[in-house]
Image (cartoon, helix red, strand yellow):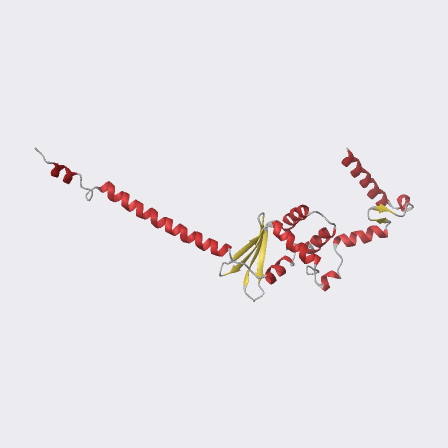
Amino acid sequence: MDGPDERLQGSGRGSDPERVDFQLSFFATEAEQIAQIDQRAETEQVSAFSFSEADWRAALASGSGFANGKERIAAYYAEHHSAKERTAFLKQEYGTGGQSWTFQDGSNGFLDYDARGIKLRSYPKGQEQRLKWSEVEKRIHVLIATGQYRDEAEQTVPTEGEILREKLAERGIVNGQLVDPEKLDSDPFIRQVVADAEATKETVSA
């Protein structure tokens, strides 16, 4: 008759292949977890990096990357829209894309735009920082208010909105009002503008 010692020997753990596989699987998973932790730490370190205010000021003051984009932005801010409206406008004006970029210290990188905001990215270090569109709006607002958005040479060049307002004033429309009624009969352009304005009022009131 078998004794208790023999039963214990039969249930030894050292020779159980399933147990060995489990241990190997456990250690592999632990190694993966450590790798993930290291990766997260590296990501957090990159995301915590901040470029200088001078770098961001230069990037935001460069415009949207499209022709006359900077002038359109300045003109839109001059129209006294709300912060929410300005944020939506900037997101649409910049769109999705980017360009190569030279930082203040002479190093190179990229300036990217997408639905989440604007991102500065250094190369080859890979350091990056993103500003949400609401943050971009606030910074551009400050640059415009303090006269840092357009330099002196750019300020002497009228924006598209300023050119349009000048042309309208020459033809008798100032601040959306017809100041020279006689031109209503003699100028087809004025008649069309007045007709469009009336149609817009009817649409809004409907």
Task: Judge left or right: residue 164 versus residue 116.
Answer: right
Does the image show residue 64?
Answer: no
- Residue 92 percent across, percent down from the top left: 64, 47
In this picture, is 35 found above or below 206? below
Hey, which residue is sitting farthest right in the picture? Answer: 182
Who's the residue at 84% across and 42% down the image? 194
Hey, which residue is sitting farthest left in the picture? Answer: 1
Q: Nearer the viewer, residue 44 or 110?
A: 44
Who's the residue at 37% across and 51% down the image? 34
- Residue 161 percent across, percent down from the top left: 76, 52
Does the image show residue 17?
Answer: yes
Task: Judge left or right: residue 88 versus residue 31.
Answer: right
- Residue 119 percent across, percent down from the top left: 56, 54
- Residue 113 percent across, percent down from the top left: 59, 52
How many numbered discs sit on the rendered protein? 0
Task: Judge left or right: residue 68 versus residue 27.
Answer: right
Who's the residue at 74% across and 61% down the image? 155
Q: Quadrant of the C terminus?
A: top right
Hey, which residue is sitting farthest front in the picture? Answer: 4
Who's the residue at 30% across and 45% down the image? 25
Task: Judge left or right: residue 121 versus residue 170.
Answer: left
Hey, which residue is sitting farthest bottom in the picture? Answer: 105
Q: Quadrant of the N terminus?
A: top left
